[in-house]
Amino acid sequence: MTQHRPGTFLELETLDRQALPYRLVGVSALEVFFGVRPGAVTTMEADLAVTDLARVFETLRFPGLPRWDLLVPHDEGEILIRSNDGDTAQVIGESEHPLLQFSYDPHRRAFSDPHELYPLLKEARQRMARDEDALPVPGLHALEAALLCSRFPFVPAAPPTPWQPDLALPAAFHRLLLSQILTGPFSARGLELLRSGGYLDQVLPELALMDTTDHSKEGHPEGNVWRHTVETMRYRKRWDLRVSLALLLHDAGKPYARPDGVHRFANHADIGADLAGKILGRLEFPRELIRDVQWLIRHHMMPGALERLPEHRRDPVMSSELFPRLLEVYRCDLSSTYRGPDGYYRACRVYRSYLKHRRRQAPGLMRLYVE
């Protein structure tokens, strides 16, 4: 593997070892240019027939996606592959933006820039390095805007063309799009573009309903459940898909919850976990990932109560390998409110004490999320 792609999928090593010709295209090529860690989806093009590609990879699927011929699943992510012999239909149902035609050859370590985008990309990269405002980009359709602006320092130069629903698109299309957006550093921007472009109303109406559910102004400065959800994305330390999906759906149960005399949104965590299972199942996410996300949602308020809970209630939860991710969900949730981070720090102290008591090594995820 080249050093340009830390964290990329091991299946690409097969192509590298055999010196088979391929290029990273679109989002994956731009990730190399910007030095952004790869997200949940790698996009590539190979100078091989589909039948030859099918012999290279042990596990693959034919996703039925426009423009893409093969889908290779691997652990936390997926690889989308198109062959030069494949369908030339457009990637998201409309004319593909020039930024998505940018490519990178890892063997030659060279970019292909057919639309002479280098000056624009160089300026955007400099802005990103200086933490300056994103660069306006013209000619974006709704889903192109959401995808590109969630992963790179771009904003639409004008309101994007609204999304036109396409019932022929398979569940894999929506799963991959959402995964790419949620594993980008600017996911909040991409999610807002999905909402304003009409995508949520058509594909994820449960999330659109969150935009009509008000929050208490005393605890939530954002205004409503959707605004709060989007705000949580800005506080992530890492763009982990499980954490991001849990944040996206952690309050999805609130529009369906009813007050019980004490809580306005009674049992919203359990309602949200059940709803997340239905939504993610509909999009054909892996079962294990769905179970993990449901667990994170169901327990997302527990870290705030660790000091008050008896050991028999809290220890089984803290013993889970997912608990460091749960603390990250809690931290992001807390950071987008008026309450401040004190509850998070108290939860971390309880967890460290638990690990010390159990004489266990703190898992790697704790170092990533807690320290």
Image (cartoon, grey):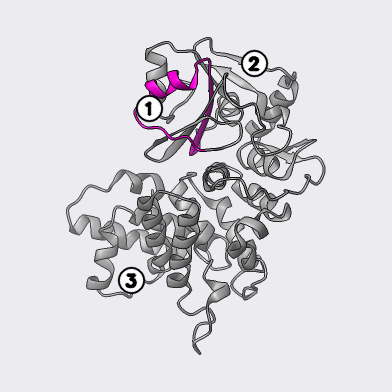
Which quadrant, please, contains the N terminus? top left
For the residue pair 18 and 364, the one nearer the viewer reads as: 18
For the residue pair 6 and 112, the one nearer the viewer reads as: 112
Q: Which mark is residue 213?
A: none
Q: Position of residue 80 (x, y in %)?
A: 51, 32
Q: Amino acid at mark 1?
A: Leu
**Distance from label 2 to label 3 (Cα)?**
56 Å
Per the rendered image, the range of residues in magenta is: 39-63
Q: Amino acid at mark 2?
A: Ser
Q: Which mark is residue 112?
A: 2
Vertical position of residue 156 compared to residue 220: above or below: above
The residue carrying pointer 1 sits among few (fewer than 14), some (14 to 19) or many (20 or more) residues within 10 Å by Cα, namely few
Q: Position of residue 179 (x, y in %)?
A: 52, 45
Q: Position of residue 48 (x, y in %)?
A: 50, 16
For the residue pair 71 and 210, the one nearer the viewer reads as: 71
Q: Are marks 2 and 1 in contact (CB under 8 Å)?
A: no
Q: Are marks 2 and 3 in contact (CB under 8 Å)?
A: no
Q: Which residue is mark 3?
A: 307
